[in-house]
Structures are given as C-alpha cells and as structure tokens.
Image (cartoon, rainbow, N blue to C red):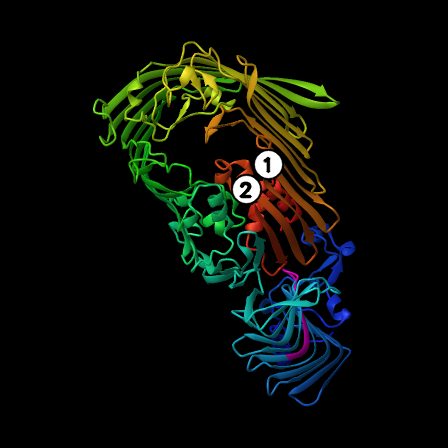
Amino acid sequence: MFSLRASLRTAVMGLTLVTAPVGLVAETVNRERIDWQPKVNLTDEQMRSVGRNCTGAYFYPTPAAGESDLAPSQAPMRASADRSRAINSNRFILEGNVQAQQGRQSIEADRLEVDRSTGTAEISGNIVLRDPSARVAAESGHINNQRGTAELHNVGVVLYQNQMRSDASRFKKHTDASIHLSNATLTTCPPGTEDWVIQAQHIDIREDNIWGVAKNPVFRFKNVPYMWLPFITFPASDARLSGFLWPGMGFSDNGGFDLSFPFYFNLAPNYDLMLSPRYIHNRGTGVEGQFRHLSSLFASSVDFALLNNDRGINNQNVDYLVDAGIIEEGDNNPFIGEDRWLLGIQSKGGSANDQNTAWYTDVDFTKVSDQNYFRDLDNTAIDVNYDTHLLRQGTFGYRWDNWQSSITARAYQTLDFYTQQPYQELPRMKLDGSYLYQGLLTELNHELVRFDQSQNFDNNDRSIIKGARARADYKVSYPLQSIWGFFTPAVYFKHLGYQLDDYNLLPEADAQQSFTALQTSLDGGLFFEREGTIFKRNYLQTFEPRLFYFYSDYTDQSSLFNLTADGQDVDFDSADITMSYNQLFRDSRFSGGDRIDDDNRVSVGLTTRFIDSTSGREVVRASLGQIYYLQDRRNFVAQYNNNYISASNQYTDAPRSELAAELAFNIGSTISWNTSVLYDEGQQVINEGRSNLQYLDNDHRLINLGFSYRRKPDTTLNDETIEQHTRQSDISMMLPVSDKVNFIARNLHDFTFERELDSFAGLEYNSCCYRARLVWRRWVSNDLSRVVADDDLNYKRGWFLDIQFKGFGSGTGKFYQLMSETIPGYSLREQAVFPE
C-alpha cells in the first residue's frame, strides 16, 4: 500500500465518479456474478430485501476500512498495486491488482496509467467501479478529468437498489455529466437468466443520473421479440420519473381486443399526468388519462377519457336490449359515430386535505357521455360497473370553536336504465354546534335542503314532489363512564318542516307543513370479566350486557302521504333502516330526514368475548339482542298494506323486533369466521343471514366461503310473479400450485334464479424478475339482471392479461382492482407476499 500524489488521486476519482445507476446484463458469467450473493450467504436483514422466488441478489460489498461510511469528499484517497513506476514527472503507471478507495467509492483494474499534464487516464483489464448505488464493470477505458468526460468499452452495470442490470458495447460520460450507452440491454432477471430483455440502440442517462431514455427499444420475452417502441424512459434511481408503464391488454365479447399504452409524465414535484392511448378493436381508438395536483391547501385529480367516433361493431349491450323488448329495433347501435367520453374531478382542500385550516372543500364530480359508457368501455372497473348513479357534488365548510357549517350542491347522473334518478340537493346547508360543560354535552344540529328534479314525472309517469325541507335536531346528554360500565341519559328536541312546490300537488294538499317531537333515551351497559382455561390455554372472558330505552312523542305525519293524484308521498331521501345488532341502540329507525320517530321501546343486548391472555387477541365474540316495543309504531316512510313493512320485514304492531345475533371466530392467525342472523320469532323464519369464512395461512393460501340470504316479498313483472328472496354464495380463492404458480378463481352464484352473476378463473406466474397473470371472466351487467328474464339475460365474457416487469414499472392497476374488490383478503395477501 502506498500514497498517491494529488494528480493521481484526481485522475482516479474522476473515474469513480462516472459510475452511473444504469442496469445491464453482463456478457460473461463471471461479470454477471460480480457482487451476486446467493440466499445461503445472506443475513436475515439482507433476506428481507430479496425478491420472492429469487435465488439471491446483488449487494454492495461494504469495504472493511473504517472510512467506508464517509463521503468521498470527506475521506482520504488510498490505493495499492503489485507494481508502480513513473515514466516522467507527469506520467504514472500502476499495474497488477490495482485497487483504490476513497470513502464509499472504489476502483479495481489490472492497469492504470495517469498523465498529470493532460488530466487524462487510461485504464484496462477487469475494471470494476463501485459505490453504494451501483457497480460498473468494463474491459478498457479512457478518462479526461479536465473536461469531465470518460469512455469505457464492453461495459456491464448493476443497480443494487432495484436489481437492474445491463450491458453495452460503449459507455460515454459527457461534459454535462450525462451518460450515453451504445447497443445496450436492460433486465432485472438474475444472472444466467434472461426471461425478459429490452434491447436498445442507444440509452441516455440524464438529470443527475436518476432517469434514462432508451431509443428504439425492442421488448423480448423468452427470447421472442414482441413489441417495439420509438422510445421509453426508465428509473435509474428511486425517484419518480416520466416514462411508459406496462401496457394493459384484454379481450371481451363486446369490445374485442383491448390494448392500452399508459405513459407517465412527471411534470413537477407537485403535479403529474398519466396519459394512456387505447385501442378497442370493435370500437376504435381513444385516450384515457389522469392529472394530479398537490398544493399546500388542495389535493386534486382530474380523470378523463375520450373515444372518438365509436364504430359500435358487435355491440351486444344494445343487441340484447332489443331482444328483451326494452328498446326498439330502430334504436339499435345508437352510439355509432358518436364520441364517448368521461370526465371526473376530485378535490379536497383545507382541513379536508389534512391542513390546519378552519375551512374545507370537497369536490367529487363524475360525468359520462351516455348511460352505456361503462358497460361498453370499462371491462374490469367493477366498482363503477355495478353503481347505478354517478355523483356530482361540491362542498364548502367552515369550523370554529363549537360550531361548524357547510353548504353542499349535489346531483347525480343515472346509469341504470330502470332506476329513478335521485333528487338533486341544490343546496344542502348545515349548521351544527356542540358544547361540553361540567360533563353535560349539548348538540345543536340544523339543516336546510332544497330537493329538485329536472323533470316532473319519473320513468313510470309517476308524479314527482319537489320542495324544501328544514330540520332542527337538539340533544342534551350526560355521558358517564367507568371501567365497570357506562350510563348515558339524553333528551331530544326534533323539528321538521316542509315548503313544497304546488306543481303536481292536489288542491287540498298542504304545501307548508311542520312537525315537532320531544324524545328521551337511557343507554347503559356493564363490563364483567373472568379468567379461565379452554383447551389448556388461558383466556379472559367478558360479559357485556347493554340496555337501551328510547321514547318519542307521537306526532301525526299522515299529511305527508297521498299528496298527488296518483298517490305519491313526501320521501326525498329516507328509508327504514335494515335491522342488525348494531341498530338495536340507535335513536332513530329511519335514515334520511323525512320522518320523526314515534317510539316507546327497550333494546336488550348481550356481548361476550374470549380474549387470549397471552396475545390479547380476540378469539370469539358473540352478540345477541332484541327490541321490545311497548306500543305500536304509527310513523313510517311509506304506507303499508296489512301493517307490513317490507323494508325491514316487520309488522307495525309486532311486540318485538327480529332477534339479532352475531358470532365471530378467529382461530389462530389463519381462520376467521363471521356470521349474522335476523330471526323472526312470530313467523319462525330467518329474514336475513350472512356467513363468511376466510382462510389465509403463512404459505399464502387464501380461501373465502360466503353465503347471504335475505327474505323479500315477491314482485310482479309482465303479469308474472317473481320471487325476490336473495340467496347467493360467493366463493373465491388464490392457491399456490407451485413456488411460482398460483391459481385464482371466484364464483358468485345466485340460487334464486340459478345463475352465475360473476365468475373468473386464471393463473398467476411469479418469477424473480416478472409477474404474469391471465384470467378469463364471465359476468352479468347488474342493472339488467334486475329486470330482464333469465332466459334473455346475456353475459359478458373476456380474457384479461397483466404482466409486470419487476423494477421496470407495473400494470395499469385494473387487474389489482378486480382482484381486491372481488376476493376478500387479496390486498392483505399481496402485502404479505410482496412486502416491498
């Protein structure tokens, strides 16, 4: 070991600084294996960063010297070689096992020749340059330290962070610190394998070595070329970068082959753009995109899509509407030649965006060109495909010490051909106050809403009632809590008023009405505990009885019924709440604000839990409860024949509610089971039941078994009685077939009509460097399944392919959306399998 002169130190460090975070495939096995560590040699900490199904990974070999943690500018230069000589006062040569290190940067070579007068250096033979981010290997090279340039030949590079590697015939560093590679390849596959490779004539590394551009890249999969692009960008660091994401591909009966090429624009640190050209074989070419913006006060996004001049070929969504007699033959393919589009705006501001402001805003606006947009053009967006309305809403609010106010404008676009559009709320104004004094809690809530519609009659030519509604809900309570229980007495004052439009009202109907009621409640519960042992395990068992009493004056609200010639009632946004165990202790049996309860009831509930004394985890939870009515109820959302309330499966004069029961088991960390039942003692039938069993073990086997039942009155369609009871099973799974292959499946079956509502099956292949998933799916458009007879109901079918090249971007997200929304536990499993 010897010390180098300043000129040699300058030349060597000029070389080490040209290491660039570019990933390449080395040409020789020896070069590929440099810094590669098999799993058997890794520490536990290193193992956590190794990708699933990888046999090892590249790691920066931490130098033994005590200065290895220092930045190069803070560390002295140290070098060694087998031989050294000086040609003259300006030229120096190091030969044989040349090694130099300055802090975290190092260089190895067979020969190094430095010319101090020109600031140049020639380096050759088994060159290896390292820093904590990358390793560069080469055969020979030339460096000009004065100009800040360098050129290396037959280069192989590895990025430690994303395991990307590459090779190139030539590596050039320019005076502006940019880097150019010629005849280069890219992959993240481990050494010895090239499952996927990107070949490019030229690669340029720009912007301080954090991103690269490949020109004329050819994608090869299993050594078969399948895609060419004029250029792509890719990350050379963990920074957010512009570039192509992996294309989305699919096939459906309705649209045919569907291909999209998303491109991400990193426009600025606080805003970006995703733009995705899309080709649908049966429809044409379009574009989709999303713009996101983040400021100190607002977080906003704009989603948009356009399909120009829809060709409408093989439009089955329209064809089977004609077959079902819903539209006329002349209306077939109504969207041929039309532009199909979508616009969505979401924005949160102020305190709604986690900012310390008194004000807040919330905008959620979505509009499409027509009702059939999602059925025709979005093959896998289940959450929208199954919705019947698109929301258009804007809210501004303000909060101060004890009060908060807001004003909201809300409207909808209805996608379902057979569902009435909800009321527009133009506007909804709220003013709510809350005071706590000496343990006494006072809540003062006020609301004023104008309910409107764009038409005076609905789809079935029924009259629509419009108008304004005002509510005042006051509550004074005194909560008392202790470790042994709680007790909360409360009194309520509720006022409801209407100013209805005269249009459609009968002459004798009162357009201006108001109602007032006084209410009171007592809510109390106790907590008991005892220790015990079950199956040789120590448990803590709790007993939690709860008693809730609620009384409300009866205020006659019958004047809200039969206000039009065809017998329509005032019902802007209200419904009877579906019964469940948690609903036993509510102070209203209605949702919305169109009715004030009349009630005199007692709710009794009991919950018991078994808690593992060692882990504190809840193993078993069981709840049972019922409401006892001390008098008949007389106020409801609608009038019912024979006192029967179809929404909640109850009779108005029933002495008690259904029996509500819930049961939950957590067996170890693998099995969870939840079930709930509503049992009608009077009719001795189960009105509603749900049961869900989930199995997820350490080997990532995921199985879900679900069943739901709900009893409903029969209905009539085209003079034919149709059973409305809902009986459905939902079975889904994701099972490892081997270390790299998973089987994916889901089946949603309707036993009422003996039909499949949604089914898919496929395979996932997960290697060290890529992930591929192929799924076939058949599903029913939800709005048609409610009105079209089973014999006329057609299914949608499609193939969906998702491929991710690891370290090089991922899929478009539609496949993940499909899985996470239809397979419970899928997101949790993904986090366990891919913790990075």
Q: Is residue 358 left or right of residue 807?
A: left
For label 2, the residue is 780
Tell me, for residue 779, which label it has, or none: none
Query: Where, quadrant-wise, is the N terminus in this rendering?
Result: bottom right
| Residue located at (58% from left, 55% from top) | 250
Q: Three-letter amino acid code at disc 1?
A: Arg
Q: Is residue 264 above or below residue 591?
A: below
Which residue is the extreme one toward the bottom?
A: 88
x and y, in percent, of residue 284 in the image: 48, 60
| Residue located at (30% from left, 40% from top) | 454
Magenta-drawn stretch, dominant element (helix, strand or loop): strand
- Magenta span of residues: 152-163
Q: Three-letter amino acid code at disc 2?
A: Val
In front of the other: 471 or 392: 392
x and y, in percent, of residue 204 in the image: 56, 73
Q: CA separation, marks 2 and 1?
A: 10 Å
Q: In the rendered image, which quarter is residue 160 located in? A: bottom right
Q: Is residue 63 above or below residue 722?
A: below
Q: Are marks 2 and 1 in contact (CB under 8 Å)?
A: yes
Q: Is residue 782 magenta?
A: no
Tell me, for residue 755, which label it has, or none: 1
Question: Label 2: how many residues lie within 10 Å, few (<14), some (14-19) or many (20+)?
Answer: some
How many numbered markers are drawn? 2
